[in-house]
Amino acid sequence: MTQIPRAERSSESPSPSPSSGAGSRPVPRIVVVGATGNVGTSVVRALAADPSVGSVLGLARRLPAWRPDKTDWRSVDIEPGGGELAPYFVGADAVIHLAWKFQPTRDPAETWRTNVLGSIRVFDAVVAAGVPALIQASSVGAYSPGPKDRRVDESWPTHGWPQAAYCREKAYVERLLDIFERTHPGIRVVRMRPGFLFKREAASEQRRIFAGRLLPGRLVRPGLIPAVPDLQGLRFQALHTDDAAAAYVAAAVRPVHGAFNLASEPPLDAPVLAAVLDARPLRMPTAPVRAALATAWRLHFVPASPDLFDAVLRLPLLDSSRAHEVLEWEPRHTSVEAVEEFLAGLREGAGMATAPLAA
């Protein structure tokens, strides 16, 4: 990775947050890259509420109207050509990197610029600014295909599902982190690998990203959907985004390192989802469902590619024991509660006062 020049602390760094104080800081200053999306808003809110955190600097391409306590905002683009990042990191105790672009799935070169090249720029800036800790948002999507009848720990291979751009990019960033850790052993690196993340305020964003604007959110309610396809491999894990944020905060303020799986119970499959929707599970072969999705994607009816559908059917179930033991982390919501809140947000057209989460 090409290193950018080290920023001068006196003249190039942005003005510090008033809450960070002058001189030595008895409590951490945390920088959150990608602070206005589903995960970012929960992480910023959790950091702002934590008395051990002194100040938060949220970085995003578009500044939000949302103004939590102890938080300053800067408009930053992590893509190549977006300007230096190191000045924003100077004096930080940890950088939490969450910025990620899911769309457009039809132009993987564009998502690569943000997700891979942008991540390289963030990692280089962490080194240039002398930040002692990097917390990276990885994903269950980084894992190679795995079992659905037992859980895997953090040693499971992270080669992704190569046909899906999201998984390819998450796996590639894992390889970048392997190199980063060997090259910079003095920097504490944490990799968060959560399952699917849901909360009420992210419903509108996730509808746009995965289902498209044609999905009538008000119809996603119990009793109106007659059946849930029961497909081979349709068993995955979910987590409330606020619970994931609690793990990020713990990783930022504790001297921990390595990877952490994050998931709630129970695993979600057709019978569980059918119970949530007051529907019935309907056993179906996978091929016609995938063919219908592929057709809808080619016709631009849905933005989620069939390759991502293939990946979901192959993702392993996660063992979160390490997070429980090392981070002393326990989710407050079940996976069913997280999905129910998300569905309620769909029906309400819920959102937040940030560009990604706008209703």
Image (cartoon, rainbow, N blue to C red):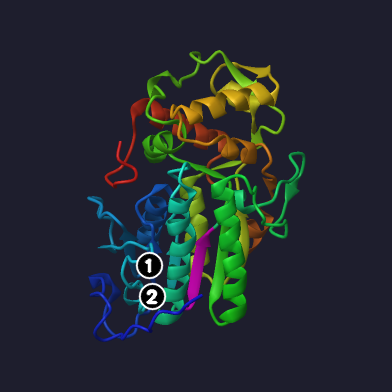
Helix, strand or loop at label 2? It is loop
Question: Is residue 136 shown in magenta?
Answer: yes
Q: Quadrant of residue 215?
A: top left
Observer-nearest of 170 and 34: 170
Helix, strand or loop at label 1? It is strand
The three-letter amino acid code for the residue at tag 1 is Val
2 or 1: tag closer to the N-terminus: 1
Position of 100 compared to 55: left or right? right
Q: Is residue 86 visible?
A: yes
- Above or below for 225 versus 27: above
Q: Residue at the location (49% across, 30% down)?
A: 298
Position of 148 compared to 241: left or right? right
The three-letter amino acid code for the residue at tag 2 is Ala
Q: Position of residue 60 (x, y in %)?
A: 32, 58
Q: Position of residue 232 (x, y in %)?
A: 72, 29
Observer-nearest of 284 and 21: 284
Q: Quadrant of residue 342?
A: top left
> Is mark 2 in CB contact (under 8 Å) with mark 1?
yes
Q: Residue at the location (36% across, 79% down)?
A: 91
Q: Position of residue 94 (x, y in %)?
A: 44, 71
Observer-nearest of 158 and 17: 158
Q: Residue at the location (35% across, 71% down)?
A: 85
* Residue at numbered disc 2: 92
Could you classify mark 1 by the number of other residues whose Cα lies within 10 Å: few (under 14), some (14-19), or many (20 or more)?
A: many
Q: Residue at the location (37% across, 58% down)?
A: 49
Q: Tell me the distance, in whole angstroms, between the alpha carbons under discs 2 and 1.
A: 6 Å
* Residue at numbered disc 1: 31
Magenta-highlighted stretch: main secondary structure?
Answer: strand
For the record, the magenta segment spans 132-137
- Above or below for 280 versus 159: above
